[in-house]
Image: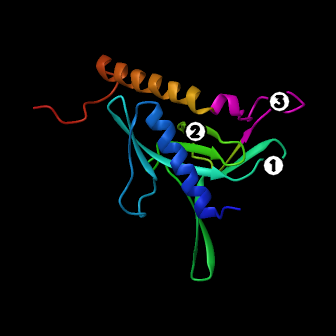
Amino acid sequence: MLNTVSIGDLGESYAIMKFTQAQTIVSKPLTNNARYDLIIEHNGKLYRTQVKTTSAIKDGKMEFATKTTNYSKGNWKSNAYSHDEIDLFFLYCAENNWCGLYIPDNNPIPQNLTIRLEPPKNNQRVGIRLAEDYAFEKQFGALAQLVEQETLNFEVGGSSPLCPTN
């Protein structure tokens, strides 16, 4: 059985493989002090990417802790991620080798993500995250559309210039 560090390493390996297969440049920080695990370069834009793994499926759901937890001075401390630190979450489940992407919206980043393999029996859709909707290939396509939309907004004048003009 793999320990938590090995499961995390496996998740990072899958992330590097999936992004590379998608013809994306992947960089890794030289130290472990960054709040992100990888930098993804896609269509000229850099994305700070945090890799989150889960080892098992429970009741048809994959649970991902999208926060950091550290043990220091006899206490456990959890830290949420902010939009200033993370652009993407790569999600990996070791039990079924499922890979997905979570692209945070403008709301606060949740500290836990539950991804369901099947819809609930009561057909509830609000607040439910289905694996098919967060699959790597589907969300990677959405990321390309997001970059294209941001480019259009910039060209049309929807954004302020990045540098002051003289």
Q: Provide residue 157's location: percent of width, then percent of height.
A: 30, 20
Q: Which mark is residue 102?
A: 2
Q: Provide residue 34's location: percent of width, then percent of height.
A: 41, 59
User: Toward which corner of the image does residue 118 lie, by quadrant?
Assistant: top right
Magenta span includes 83: no
Quadrant location, the N terminus: bottom right
Which one is earlier in the sequence, the residue at label 2 or at label 3? 2
- Image point (67%, 49%), residue name: 94
Q: Provide residue 120's location: percent of width, then percent of height.
A: 85, 33
Q: Nearer the viewer, residue 55 or 67?
A: 55
Magenta span = 115-134
- Image point (76%, 35%), residue name: 117
Magenta span includes 117: yes
Q: Secondary structure at mark 3?
A: loop
- Image point (31%, 17%), residue name: 156
CA gap, disc 2 and disc 3:
20 Å
Task: Tell me: 136 left or right of 48.
Answer: right
CA gap, disc 2 and disc 1:
20 Å
Q: What residue sits right under mark 3 in the picture?
A: 124
Q: Provide residue 41's location: percent of width, then percent of height.
A: 37, 37
Can residue 65 be seen at all in this image of the molecule? no
- Say what amino acid the circle numbered 1 marks: Lys
Q: Which mark is residue 33?
A: none
User: Toward which corner of the image does residue 75 lie, by quadrant?
Assistant: bottom right
Q: What residue sits right under mark 1 in the picture?
A: 58
